[in-house]
Image (cartoon, grey):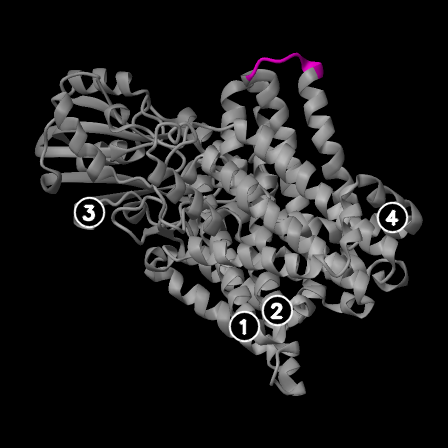
Amino acid sequence: MADPAGAPENGAEGTHHAPKEKYWALVLGSIGVVFGDIGTSPLYAMREALAHSRGGGGGELAVLGVVSLITWALILIVTIKYVVFLMRADNKGEGGTLALMALAQRVSPGRRSTIILGLGMLGAALFYADGIITPAVSVMGAVEGLRDAPGVPKQAADWVLPIAAAILVALFLVQSRGTASMARFFGPITAAWFLVLAGLGLYHIFEDLSVFRALSPHYGVIFLLDNGFLGFIILGSIFLAVTGAEALYADMGHFGRNPIRAAWLVLVLPCLLLNYLGQGALVLAHPEARTNPFFEMVPQVIYWPVLLLATAAAVIASQAVITGAFSMTQQAVQLGLFPRIDIRRTSETQAGQIFVPTVNNMLLVGVLLLLFVFRSSSNLAAAYGIAVTGSMFVDTLLFFYIVRYMWKRPVWQAALASATFGALDVVFIASNLLKIPQGAWLPLALGATLVLIMWTWNRGAAILAEKSRRDSVPLLELADILKARAPHRAPGTAIFLTSDPDTAPVALMHNLKHNKVLHEKNIILSVSVSETPRVADDARVRIEPVNDDFKKVTIGYGFMESPNIPKALTLCRKQGLKFDIMATSFFLGRRSVVPSAQSGMPLWQDKVFIFLMRNAANPTDFYKIPPGRVVEMGTQVTV
């Protein structure tokens, strides 16, 4: 994920030797970025679970059962699954669904790569769905506290939706300016929020100390059995307490596994448990508080400060998801799941500070539509869980390949590990699927659309590449032909960008055919994306001489990096290849694609691919090539 806090991008291994001050700075930074989403769950999770319980959730068994289920969901899913196990499966320090997909593809036999690719697409698509719902439900859940605020008239209920919309519009509008200046406050504000959660919980626990019985899991089991099929539905609301758990894994590359683990175990988990126990004790003592237990906890004298802090925490949670969507897009483009997209850096020093205008605009439109269609956090909560549970299940399935092929464990151990966590995921997925009529259809529909787009782009690009290889002349064969029939020579250096360095680029063939000219120096340049997050500068450029006329140059990038070809080419000088970038011509082949009924995809899918290709970012901008040095040569191909 992109790092909205501007934290140093230390891998998971890098924190072992870090000075104590730096280590605790990473811990504080992770609190602001990683735990914002799960930290806003107390605003609505308990309320929703009790509301769906038999008899309205005011009885003793309902309260103890809900608190027990939330407690053990936090322990089993977040602590054991993610903190103990999944955070051990890192791709050079990076986590997240696409990093896990790339790692699984690297260590697994090739025949399984299609399954792994499909799982990665599904996980990424569900993450985008979560990215639309999280800002809406978090901000709405916080602003709804305005209804019970002291001194506010009854008409305040009408203000909630416009205020939430205004906050979110402002949040999306500032993305283009970068968030580094604000991000330094994320950690302290979110840490203060968790301490307030703990303080409110402690304040009310003493109203009924018997709430500590909820720490026993058997109360959760009895509650589910007592509610029958309704108890299965309630599990979907219980899951709201652990939404955001996947962020522990996704942001591992920015803070390191140890700081994130320390933040969770030392501060976040204890504060959450204290707050949920406090909410339970409050409802046991005052059953009428079950309608909105969190804001009922807040004493009148500090209500406004807590409301403002809750809103700030919700904005920070939304910010982390938005920048996470930017980072996911960068990874997806580099891994070939999306066409080239305009990705802008908002910081000269922080690699994680990026802005993707297309994604930002789509998220803004999606969030506002959700707000005005669902109109309350309770309605939004119905759509929330399925995207997160699906994303977690994808992580579990990919974890099988890590245990089996990376850790080289027997099949039965890999299957047992995945089945244990998968059983939990499937139960929560099934529970959330029951909410399809209430809104869970939305993330499923959005996820299916995004999977279709990614699959179409990946498949179409592969078909085009295969056709190009079939129709092209091998570079070595062309070099021999040019020796026998030397064309006219033009002074300077020509760089031909291609995806296949072993065949003559289309732009080179057109230049020879129509202009009948060959430059003095010719570089066949290709960009490769590795399945690791980053590539070191000393391994970025590889030069392979073909003959006196041609040299092949391959520039390598990790899937977390943004390509910058001119900057990378300066590294060629260390390997003896010298040229003036401003006296060099870059030749790009521009393909005009037309649909064909005889292609490898249905005609409608051809048209989707062509639409995506036409709307892809200009390669000149994407690769940061000086526009004045670019020559484009077009050709028409079918897909």
Dot 3: element: loop
* Identity of the residue drawn at 9% across and 34% down: 492
Instruction: Determine which of the numbered discs, if any, sits on residue 223 in the image.
Output: 4
User: Which kind of residue does numbered mark 1 sit on?
Assistant: Ala
Front disc: 3 or 4? 4
Q: Nearer the viewer, residue 385 or 633?
A: 385
Task: For marks 1 and 3, give the CA distance.
Answer: 40 Å
Q: Is residue 41 left or right of residue 214?
A: left
N-terminal of the pair, mark 1 or mark 3, is 1
Apparent side of residue 123 relative to residue 627 in the rendered image (left or right): right
Q: Nearer the viewer, mark 2 or mark 3?
A: 2
Q: Earlier in the sequence, mark 2 or mark 3?
A: 2
Q: Which residue is painted at 33% across and 49% down in the image?
A: 618
Residue that mark 3 sits on:
626
Instruction: Give percent across and percent down for residue 179.
Output: 36, 57
Query: Residue type at mark 3?
Result: Pro
Q: Tell me residue 183's x, y (percent).
A: 38, 56
Residue on which the image places disc 1: 165
The image shows residue 7, relative to residue 404, as above or below, that is: below
Cβ atoms at labels 2 and 1 below 8 Å apart: yes
Q: What residue do we see at 65% from left, 56% from top?
A: 202
What segment is highlighted magenta in the picture?
407-412
Which dot marks residue 371?
2
